[in-house]
Amino acid sequence: MARKFDVLRAIELFHSYRETRLREGIVKLQPHEEPLRSELLSGKFTVLGVRDPSGASIALYTAKLHHPSKTGNHVVLQALFYLLDRAVESFETQRNGLVFIYDMAGSNYTNFELDLSKKILNLLKGAFPARLKKVLILGAPVWFRVPYNLLSLLLKEKLRERVQMVKMADLRQHLPRDCLPEHLGGCLPLDVHSWNLQLLSEQNGRVDPVDELVGVPLENTSIHVPGPEGMGLPELTAHLNRAQRSGIYLEYEELRREQPPGTFTCALAPHNQERNRYGDVPCLDQTRVRLKARRNERSDYINASFMDGYKQKNAYIGTQGPLEKTYGDFWRIVWEQSVLLIVMTTRMEEGGRRKCGQYWPQEEGGQEVYGHIAVVNHRVDNHAHYNQTTLELHNTETFEQRQVTHFQFLSWPDYGVPSSAVSLIDFLWAVKHQQQWAVQAFGSQWRGHPLGPPMVVHCSAGIGRTGTFCALDICLSQLQDVGTLNVYQTVRRMRTQRAFSIQTPEQYYFCHTAILEHTQRQGLLSANQ
């Protein structure tokens, strides 16, 4: 009802909502357990028991009650999602939307947290299923009002027109007097939050269907799906012309400043440190690839992360260039995850520095044993910008064998970008064509996603060139499917799975220019557009 019966828009919103919850790790909410219960009863966030004249719900966030040193963002967002889920169960809220009051009265700078405020407002704009009618920032302190760019940092352009800063005395102009809680203004008594208490009592023992649906790891549900922020080619061209290189670099800086949404406990454990090529490039606990348990083995850790592709869960395994001590682990994940393709976007040495180990037999006819996987080099095909090697794997424990294709791209400078997108995109098409052929050859042995098992993609650290390759694949796949793409959202989502993906602003800018260069070459966009 909130979207005027627009079913596609409703589906987009739910994808955005689910993606936000998964990105923030907000699944299986337990409102009766600490610390969520205390947060719900703190009165910091609530949906009032009154409505505005149009029937919209009134949600209130009281900044004065938030103390960043005591409560982490994660718990605040849990409470926010829980209460909004409950509010939108009302058909009246679905039909008439929501008014959000950001009550800053009586708050100090120590109560303010930019990152949390951005997440709250962008959630309400893009992922909340009921229409956000307006945001009223009440009693904004001087330090918030004077540098008006603070508001610009908080809000995206489309939301700003619905936001107003108001004083307590002016609030009655927006909401009639009989709709105002008596003590609004940072002084809400606890009994105003009886709605929260009532919800907790109603929820006792009840399974939340929305929470269950969000938490289910659907086999083929990817974080990369078309969304309302998609751009067609003319919009992408206009955006690039308007922003120029400096504006795109600023976009990247915004992405770079966002903290990864998970933890790095396993990657940073002392006994796993030697398995990381670079100490400042760990992988997230939430998306890391785990080696299958073996007897007398202390750790299941390898610096490798599952990464979704376009409409394909776990399309890639993004990983670092193998170290000599991790060759056996590398080939184990290739075997255990049924990998058919390995994409290498680095040379072994660049600029006199070791970037990756020689983890496969390089010469035709060569063979090496790594742990319990024997690898035989059957054939090497040398192309202008890449080498394609056909390898045969033999599992010495099960006596099974499997064919894997190894692609090595040779024309990509470390930290930099190719001078032209042509060679890289031709390489990408060769990789995709081989994956398609390999899946067909694999036949009934593969029962997962029709596009096949994950392909391993690596450079040296597994984030710069690896992230750029995957971002281009995702964006071009979406463009081919629905005619839209969004580089910013693609990279942002990717970084929630393989932290720090896209290592430099030049690589981020290259993603944009490579897409336009490719589309012009294909005749999809004229050179003067």
Image: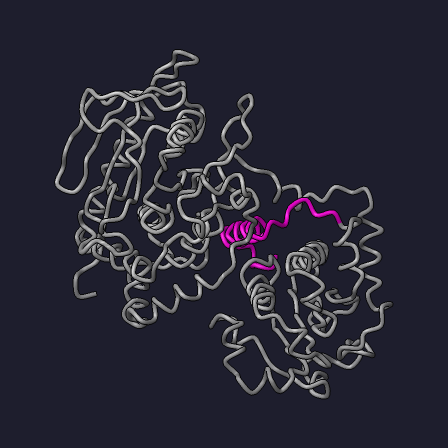
The magenta stretch is 1-30
Which corner quadrant of the image does residue 410 belong to? top left
Image location (x, y in percent) of residue 468: 33, 51
Q: Residue furthest right?
A: 191
Which corner quadrant of the image does residue 344 belong to? top left
Q: In this view, does 128 lie to the left or right of 313?
A: right
Front-lying residue, 206 or 412: 412
Residue 376 lies within the magenta run: no
Q: In this view, does 3 lie above or below 181?
A: above
- Please name the residue shown 50% across and 36% down the image: 301
Q: Is residue 205 above or below residue 512?
A: above
Image location (x, y in percent) of residue 365: 19, 20
Here the colouring is: one colour
Quadrant including the N terminus: bottom right
- Please name the residue shown 34% across and 71% down the image: 247
User: How many discs appear?
Assistant: 0
Front-lying residue, 120 or 311: 120
Quadrant including the C terminus: bottom left
Q: Residue furthest left?
A: 384
Image location (x, y in percent) of residue 454: 40, 34
Q: Is residue 137 left or right of residue 197?
A: left
Front-lying residue, 68 or 225: 68
Front-lying residue, 520 or 403: 403
Residue 27 lies within the magenta run: yes
Asked if one can make out residue 55 in the rendered structure from this viewpoint, the answer is no
- Please name the residue shown 40% across and 19% down the image: 372
Image location (x, y in percent) of residue 354: 28, 44
Q: In this view, does 341 lie to the left or right of 294?
A: left
- Please name the residue shown 36% across and 49% down the image: 467
Asked if one can make out residue 201 in the rendered structure from this viewpoint, the answer is yes
